[in-house]
Amino acid sequence: MNTDEFRGLGFVPQKEIVYNKLLPYSDKLDEESNDILAKIKANLGRAVQLRELWPGVLFWTRKLSTYIRLYGRKFSKEDHVLFIKLLYELVTIPKLEISMMQGFARLLVNLLKKKELLSREDLELPWLPLYELLERILYSKTEHLGLNWFPNSVENVLKTLVKSCRPYFPEDATKEMLQEWRPLLCPFDVTMQKAIGYFELFLPTTLPPELHQKGFKLWFDELMGLWVSVQNLPGWEGHLVNLFARLASDNIGYLDWDPYVDKIFTRILRSLNLPVGSSQVLVPRYLTNAYDIGHIVLWVSSMLGGPSKQTQKQLSGLFNSITSFFHPSNNGRWLMKLMKLVQRLPASVVRRLHRERYKKQTWLTPVPDSHKLTDQDITDFVESMKQPVLLAMFSKTGSLDAAQALQNLALMRPELVIPPVLEKTYPAMETLTEPHQLTATLSCVIGVARSLVSGGKRFPEGPKHMLPLLMRALPGVDPNDFSKCMITFQFIATFSTLVPLVDCSSAVHERDDLTEVERELCSVSAEFEDFVLQFMDRCFALIESSTLEQTREETETEKMTHLESLVELGLSSTFSTILTQCSKDIFKVALEKVFNFATTNIFETRVAGRMVADMCRAASKCHPAESLKLFVPHCCNAITQLTVNEDVLREEELDKELLWNLQLLSEITRVDGDKLLPYREQCVKILQRTLHLKCKQGYMLSCNLLHHLLRSASLIYPTEYCSIPGGFNKPLSEYFPIKDWGTPGDLWNLNIHWHVPTSEEKAFVFYILDIILQPELVKLQRHASGELEMPRDDILQSLTIVQHCLMGSGSFLPFLDGERITDLVPSLVSLGETALYTGVDYDMSRENYRDAICSVMRKLLHHILENSEDDTKSLFLIIKIIGDLLQFRGSYKHEFDSRWKSFNLVKKSMENRLHGRKQHIRALLIDRVMLQQELRKLTVEGCEYKTIHRDLLRDLLRLSTSTYSQVRSKAQQVFFVTLGSYNFCCRDLIPLVLEYLKPDRQDISQQQFKGALYCLLGNHNGVCLANLHDWDCIVQTWPAIISSGLSKAMSLEKPSIVRLFDDLADKIHRQYETIGLDFSVPDGSLEIALQIMKSKNPTTNLPLPTSEEIEKGVQLQQAKNIDSVLKYERLVNSLLDSLNQRNLPWKFEHIAIGFLSLLLRDDKPLPVPAIRFFVQSLNHDALVVRKMAISAVAGILKQLKRPHKKVEENPYEIGRCSEHSEILVGDRPDNQWMLYDSGSLPRTKEAWVACAFVEKTHWGYYSWPQKLSLYAPAEEQPKLGLKREDMTEVEQIIFDHFSDPKFIEQLIKFLSLEDRKGKDKFNPRRFCLFKGLFRNFDNAFLPVLRPHLERLVADSHESTQRCVAEIVAGLIRGCKHWTFEKVEKLWEFLCPLIRTALTNITVETYSDWGTCIATACESRDPRKLHWLFEMLMESPVNGEGGSFVDACRLYVLQGGLAQQEWRVPELLHRLLQYLEPKLTQVYKNVRERIGSVLTYIFMIDVSLPNTLRTSSPRISDFTARILVRLKPLMDVDEEIQNHIVEENGYGEQDERTQAIKLLKTVLKWLMASAGRSFSTAVPEQLQLLPLLFKIAPVENDDSYDEMKRDAKTCLSLMSQGLLYPQQIMLVLPVLKEIAGSTSWHARYTVLTYLQTMVFYNLFTFLNNKEAVHDVRWLVLKLLQDEQLEVREMAATTLSGLLQCNFLTMDAPMQTHFEKLCKTRLPKKRKRDPGSVVDTIPPADLVKRHAGVLGLSACILSNPYDVPTWMPQLLMDLSAHLNDTQPIEMTVKKTLSNFRRTHLDNWQEHKQQFTDDQLLVLTDLLVSPCYYA
């Protein structure tokens, strides 16, 4: 840091925004910032100590975030740490209202953002409070019941918060986290996702190397082992990848990734989901759970480098294998991913290089030298990416990704990347037929522009290309092709920003110290002038072809179209850039030219005129003195002469020439104010002449002139944006421009020339206001008071002048002032506004015109509203003026936002990420400083609300409820913006808005009613008055919205009003977040607040709070809590009251009930009347209301739930075994006691009480939690089954209703109605309702419900069955804590009921019963449900009721068992034993169901690390048994046909038929398990492979049967499976064996299987030399197969393997094919008339064909380029053009394919052939002429 940092600050700032130092008034800022910071510290500390969260703490934390936006982190380290600690305490307050929590969290993230500022020594943050916060919100137990409403953004905010705090977790955090979340790692359970998600989010990876033992080394092997062994991409795998990527990036050099590299790349390649082969079956979950590209890229770029270079080798392999997918002719849903990969990888490597070579060292661990990227590493990396990026330039998704990639690659190795891009660009500029090529190449050249122009030692010849590129780009300025025109403008502007356009040709003779390149550049630079003039000619042509007369008829619109305005923008900014960068000589020529063009023609002022005026403005901005000297006198004379005659003033249509000169003058005055002063007399004269023209177009132009004159004189702005400070006007001997090509601006010596208004300019501004504004105000004032009649046009004209005066001089006029309105919100701390200095010292001695305009406007407004409300044009202007009076001081928010956006775009396209350190070009840096100045001007939030604001807001409200819709909407926009900027003004206005909605008002029109509703609704991003998160406001607005239904102005016939109410209700439901009732502040934060108040530098000036104040704070806070509860109850009651009003339309009834349902909370039960209302509404006539009531009552029952006591148990004692230290997963001795064991089920009361029930399924699978809490014995639990007199009032209400048979009868009737036919599903809300009833009231309601259930279950209708299913599921889950006797009774009733239901099951209801049983078994100990399981297991497949019922029973059983996961091995064994004999089912639906059930049975048999062998059924045993039964099929060698008719014939069928039936079921099982299990049982599947190959068909026709189709699907899915390295050597022998099979179908299918398998496990194969050899042998063997189809498929496979660089085209292979080609075929003899067959021995023909196919495969494996060996191979091939069929066919196909794929770049490819070869080729490729 500089030594002067104590410069009056008194501390070293952490990191401030440097741009502040460059502002013209920077010397005042230190004092200002210290003053603000002291206030923030004092008031924030005070607010916390007085426990005033709202408004105090909230207000001052907002001020702190504004402070950071304006000054950066300009506070001392000690303050920084204190702020963070305070906010951490605040964020983790348990009952904090959610919107406050988000506000604090965002600020905390902002404070923690730059982690290099605070090291682990400075700050330590605990992790547990954050975990509890996330658990409470993201995994809320009550949100789904509607007891908590969280905003959508909360998840991202919280995750970002954890990421920001992560570096500061204590060193033991890792260990504690593992202990906390390891027990959740049960792969069959949803908790797995949660645990891995938490690991990814929380585990710290930035610990210093000496703490690695306490960091990642504790978990790396364990989680890596898990990742490597999971095969089927479950949802949580992506989280692991993200964690590893972060680990790799934070610890480069401390982890050895080599053992995993091939596994990592194989998985990355699979995750791209690229298609292989034609008929691939995709596993849908591969698409949804694919890895996140951003993290893949981070991981790969972090593994590069290091001693072994493994990663680069695999990365090159990866790009080699996917390059052809980038070719523009390929397209698919995978393309976006590939483009993202290409775009982000170079960026990530550049970021890493920056960190290693250029970034300042911080406390974070540096990369050790051994692992830093060397120059060779970078070169290799760029080489490997070059090919795909160059192909991606022309991609279907546009060239942006490629341009960004090239920009980053060119930063590292310009000499490798830029030349090929230029090679593509030059031809593209010549072509006329392919504009897409031009736009793509130009946007890529723009990306590399900076690297090209600055040359440097790596690419010295770069700059030579600049002029040729510029000259050739000129034709792109083309009026007929919009996109080409725009990209050309961008291209020219980019290059001219980087290069001074100065003619240095004379330097060649004057200087002798030039290098060769510099000499060349000097002589070339003579063409710059030529270039500028040609560019101007092009622009003039463009302008002439876009005049209004040219482009549209008279009648059409006169405005510019959107495209025209874009072209105008492009043209003016490009021209302005060129002139800025010109030398004075070139500028003079250009100025002359533009002046002549502008003054010798007359343009219409709408389109062409604007473009020309823009060009003139650009010229006058660059060198104001020279330009104004030409333009001003010319325009003034012309205007004066044309207005000599007084009649002109009254003409409706003015002379074109007058208008054009006015327009020209108004634009060229937008220049540096002090250069305008010499011409002030002339300008004022013109103003006085033209401001009162009758013609609107005329006086508008004149007003623009007025506006621009005032603006130029009164604003602060930089006057030049040249790329070198001080411009280029020095002699060549002193200054040599060539050296400055592409140099960045120097942030510390920017030497900005600011325009700061001088006293002379101030006087000029006020002079204009006095002589022009004053008379208008007097006129309007007199009109408003009725003294002077003015026609409307005159009023409009006067208002226009006033508006332009205000817009021009806004920055000189102090803001409106008045007395503060203080009584809106009581507070113990000051809520004052902070005024920022923006470079203007207001002159208080002069009249403040803002006040004057304000008072006149208000009078005029009231006058117009009373006398002529239909003068809408004047009202529009008054609204605009009111908005400016309130907010405007020189710049508009929307303009600022768009400038900020475009600044960021330009910065991105031209930045140098490699060196960093803000090395932007100078113009960009100046722009950023200017934005900083604008930002200060626009920072006005938190303004005090004064009486004058109240008056203006009331006027706006009156306008917002006007009769005319356009006036309303314009006023509302200003109204909303203003609401957001004054503190608490909403509270003042809500009652006024609600006045319009009162039902008893008779004088409200529909328009006013609508306007008021719009005011409540708010715009899409501003304040919504109807839904401020505050009790005071909602208590007023919600009931008012409901009772407005009775207003006279309300009519449901008007669709616009109905839509408004819908939108309002919808917005409130969307935006509502639970509002807090408890505002207490924990004591931990008080201590930190005290420290903040005491801390020095800057010292706070407020005294510490006294003990009386603190005591008062405590009382106020308690009072606020009580008050909130009262308001909450008042709101609920007033909503209920309004519901009971007579004649309330139904729509409002529904809205009110919707509002009530938002008010359910988990910390306070609903008031009794509301509960009674909801319970009664369960039987409301309207379906919508019933639905809301069901949800609400379910929530109410949750509120009434009594807490159950838990006790801690030791699992090892229950299981009677000793603890073990190492990690063992799965079935261990210490978790045996939890498993289902029919020998020891709790069938008696004693056994039931003695049994330790564990409800959660995942406990104990991976490891035991530190504290296992189980429910205490029944006698310690709250008493269930209370008598009515022991219940609370609320419970009595519910009890009375549900014990009433009539009520229940009605309820059941409603519940068994169908809602939407065929769309209804099992409804979880209703299930929650019944679960709650039975949980809270024991079995009290069973007697009333029982007859209904028995009646309904007998009825097989869809809706009645669903109703029973919902109640039964609720019953089973609700009886969790019932006593044994009651449970036993319940099951005696339920078992027959469910049996009946299962016999009556139908297509519509089977999924509901499945859901019912699955829901009932979820999170329940299986031993508690043994009645249910034993009943379901009785005989699932017994054939009674037909195949469908069997399938359904299996489905229902599967639902129950799947929920129990690993805890029911005995049931799974029993089920498997039962099913095995029945596997030969004939019915398809039963087969599919059995397949699915088998998947679940074997799901538990996983091969994950540290996992013990499961006691559940195992695949290997099962497969062995199956294979025995399939033997009859294995032994035969012919293809298997499917001859079985679907019916169970009696009599014993032979073994073979049985085997085929069995096989069909096995296929269903293989298909079902492909997507679901965690690990694929490869060895077992391999034994079945030969069978599948025999069945699978080759052709794609639809006629073949189910078995063949299934076999084909199975093969496709199996070939995509992920293989472990050791499994590869198991697969290949099987494939070899099948390749020797007699069936050619099997041999053919082996090839398709091989293609997919190799591609999807590419790097695992490549890592194994032997495997590569075997694959090669297999393909070459099948190339010589006797069956033609197999040979052709083998050729395709070979070409694919060559293309993805799995095999290489080496000499031995080439000679092998050439030798085969030369196999002699005997001469054809003359045929005897008798012999029909050719007598060529087939073996020779096959060999020869194999050779030709081999050559053809090599040629087709390079579809997009021509390697050196290709020409020769093509010649070899052509020799066989006249061979016998099928050889001739192959050669022809190959040649036509070659022609098709190489046509695009034939010019380039031609270079590889000799002339002779080209002759031969041309003969071959041109089809012979048939007429010769």
Image: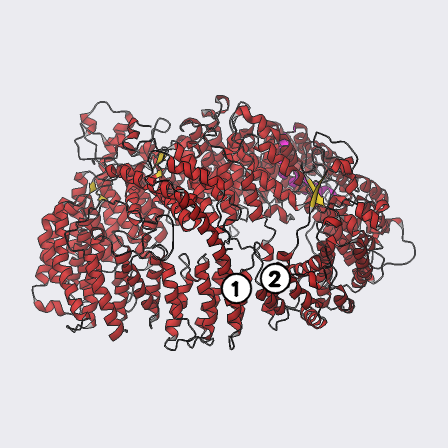
Q: Is residue 1011 magenta?
A: no
Placement of 158 over or under 1333, stated as above or below: above
Placement of 163 over or under 537, stated as above or below: above
Q: Position of residue 378 (x, y in %)?
A: 46, 28
Q: Position of residue 1038 (x, y in %)?
A: 47, 65
The secondary structure making up most of the magenta span is helix
What's under tag 1, amino acid-wise? Val
Q: Quadrant of the N terminus?
A: top left
Q: Is residue 505 visible?
A: yes
Name the secondary structure under disc 2: helix
Asked whether 1611 or 703 is in front, the reply is: 703
Q: Residues within 10 Å of mark 1 (few under 14, many from 20)?
A: many
Name the front one of labels 1 and 2. 1
Placement of 1463 over or under 876, stated as above or below: above
Q: Position of residue 1621 (x, y in %)?
A: 67, 32
Residue 1388 is labelled as none
Q: Which residue is mark 1?
A: 1132
- Residue at image point 53% right, 38% down: 295
Which tag, 1 or 2, sits closer to the chain's start? 1
Q: Is residue 1645 magenta?
A: yes
Residue 562 horizontal side relative to residue 1223, left or right: left
Mark 1 in CB contact with mark 2 (< 8 angstroms):
no
Q: Which residue is mark 2?
A: 1191
Q: Which region is colored magenta? A: 1642-1664
Q: How is the image coloured?
A: secondary structure
**Residue 515 sits in quarter:** top left
Name the secondary structure under disc 1: helix
Q: Residues within 10 Å of mark 2 (few under 14, many from 20)?
A: many
Toward the right, the furthest residue is 1547
What's under tag 2, amino acid-wise? Ser
Residue 998 horizontal side relative to residue 1156, left or right: left
